[in-house]
Each structure stands twice: as C-alpha cells, then as structure tokens.
Image (cartoon, rainbow, N blue to C red):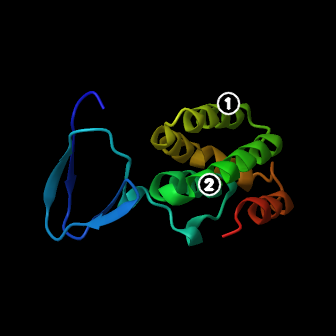
C-alpha cells in the first residue's frame, strides 16, 4: 500500500481483516498503515443471497478474501465458475467484464473484482428477466458452482 487508508465504522459494525472478523462497540476510525485485505460488512454476501450466477461468483470471490485457509479451493471454484459463466452469457458487456474480473483475481486484485462483479448485477438482472439465459441453465449453474 503506497499510502494509509482510513475507515470510519459505526457502533456494532463488522469488518473482515485478513481473514479475521472484527466488530466495533462504538463509532471508530481505523487507519491501515500497510497492505491489508479487508471487506466491510455491507459488502459481504451471505450464502442465502447467492440467488443469481453473478452473486454466486461474487460469493466465491469474497471467500478468497475472507477465508485465507480455503483460498486455493475457492480459487479453483472461481476458475470453474468463470469458465461456465463465459460459456453461458452471450452479452458482450458481461463477457468482457468477466474476463477482466478473471484477470483481476489472477493478479491478486480480488477486492477490485468484487466491485466489478457488483457493477454487473443490473445487466444480469435484465438478462435473466428476458430469459436470455433460461431458468434451466441458471439452475444448472447453481448446482455446479455452489456446492455450499
């Protein structure tokens, strides 16, 4: 990290830092002075919220960050998922962005990949609502890439 990073957290808020979960008991500001892997609570997707293919991909990518012990397993599942999604989506915007997300994760920029995946949610919703990807394909994706 080239400069410090300051975050403000509200009372009771959680933050995931290098695989540990921290909860603050009052409003605080924290400053990271060196490289750190973190996720704010409002960016953490719960398993029950992985209702679409891209949300499943997001969940897998977030596990790379917040579960260092299972990183290799999560990376393998991420690679499988990206491959399946690229074969299912026809929308060029999503395909291009998925390739960029894959490159980001491969280069260790998983936090940036999470942000990019979140940005694709509206396009994915439009595609799913138009049945460009059939419900049967979505079900198959869910079965293949979400063995939680």
In-front residue for pair 3/118: 3
Image quarter of residue 138: bottom right
Dot 1 or dot 2: first in sequence order is: 2
Mark 2 residue element: helix
Image quarter of residue 15: bottom left
User: Would you name the residue on which mark 2 appears?
Assistant: 74
Q: Is 62 above or below relative to 96? A: below
Answer yes or no: is residue 56 visible: yes
Return the x and y of residue 90 as percentages of the image width and height.
80, 38
The N terminus lies in quadrant = top left
Name the side, left or right, on which 99 lies relative to 20.
right
Return the x and y of residue 130 as percentages of the image width and height.
76, 51
Mark 1 residue element: helix
Within 10 Å of the Cα at label 2, are there few (<14), some (14-19), or many (20+) other Cα atoms?
many
User: Would you name the residue on which mark 1 appears?
Assistant: 96
Q: Is 83 above or below relative to 59? A: above
Residue lying farthest to the top in this orientation: 2
Residue at 49% across / 36% down in the picture?
109
Return the x and y of residue 13 as percentages of the image width and height.
27, 66
Numbered badge on residue 24: none
Number of numbered discs visible in the structure rendering? 2
Residue at 14% across / 58% down in the picture?
28
Within 10 Å of the Cα at label 1, are there few (<14), some (14-19), or many (20+) other Cα atoms?
few
In-front residue for pair 92/70: 70
The C terminus lies in quadrant = bottom right
Residue at 57% across / 39% down in the picture?
105
């Amino acid at each position: 990290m080239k400069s410090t990073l300051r975050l403000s957290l509200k009372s009771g808020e959680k933050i995931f830092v290098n695989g540990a979960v921290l909860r603050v008991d009052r409003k605080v500001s924290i400053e990271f002075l060196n490289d750190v892997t973190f996720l704010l609570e409002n960016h953490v997707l719960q398993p029950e919220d992985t209702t679409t293919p891209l949300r499943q991909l997001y969940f897998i990518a977030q596990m790379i960050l917040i579960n260092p012990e299972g990183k290799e397993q999560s990376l393998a599942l991420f690679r499988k998922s990206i491959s399946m999604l690229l074969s299912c989506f026809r929308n060029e915007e999503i395909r291009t962005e998925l390739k960029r997300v894959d490159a980001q994760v491969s280069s260790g920029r998983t936090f940036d990949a999470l942000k990019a995946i979140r940005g694709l949610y509206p396009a994915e919703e439009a595609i799913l609502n138009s049945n460009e990807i059939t419900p049967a394909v979505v079900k198959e994706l869910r079965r293949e890439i979400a063995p939680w």
